[in-house]
Image: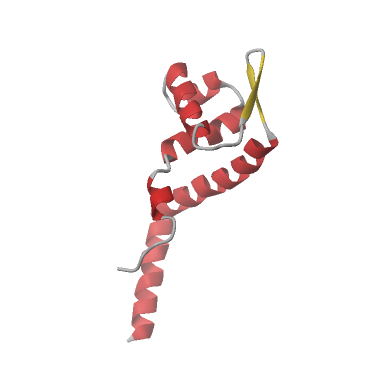
Amino acid sequence: MPYVSGLGTIRRIDLNAMLFFVVYMRYRKISSVAKVLNCSGATASIMLRRFCEDFSEVLFERKSRNLTPTRFACDLFIRCERIMRDLSDIYSVEAHSSCVSDIRDNNRQLR
């Protein structure tokens, strides 16, 4: 089996924490994240903090009771949202059916 570059980094990615980040960036309130993801505010806060700890760059600046995203967080959000959308597409029933169909067609062409 060939070596996959970056495998160690990929294995430590917490997709759940990334989801909390994406939802927070969309709604900008921990209480909204908790409601959307059906969890407590404490859980939402912990997961957002866990995501932030994976980066050496600061993602948020605290201003009174609000978290203001940094430019880095805004750029990261665009990329993470794309990843979440792609994962959602991969696991959707329609995409799965289409993918299986494409694979079968490709296999027929190879014969």
Is residue 92 shown to the viewer in this render? no
Name of the residue lying farthest toward the left: 1
Name of the residue lying farthest toward the top: 64
Q: Is residue 66 left or right of residue 89?
A: right
Q: Is residue 58 left or right of residue 41?
A: right
Which residue is found at the position 59% from the left and 47% from the top?
A: 79
Viewer-closest of 35 and 61: 61
78, above or below 52, in the image: below
Task: Give x and y (percent) for residue 65.
Answer: 63, 13
Quarter occupied by the N terminus: bottom left
Quarter occupied by the C terminus: bottom left
Name of the residue lying farthest toward the front: 56
Task: Give x and y (percent) for residue 87.
Answer: 45, 50
Viewer-closest of 110 and 61: 61
Viewer-closest of 30 and 6: 6
Which residue is found at the position 42% from the left and 36% from the top?
A: 16
Which residue is found at the position 56% from the left and 29% from the top?
A: 24
71, above or below 111, in the image: above
Q: Is residue 57 left or right of residue 41?
A: right
Task: Give x and y (percent) for residue 44.
Answer: 47, 24
Quarter of the view holding residue 104: bottom left
- Model colouring: secondary structure
Task: Give x and y (percent) for residue 17.
Answer: 45, 34
38, above or below 76, in the image: above
Looking at the rendered structure, the number of numbered marks drawn on it comes to: 0
Which residue is found at the position 36% from the left and 65% from the top?
A: 3
Quarter of the view holding residue 68: top right
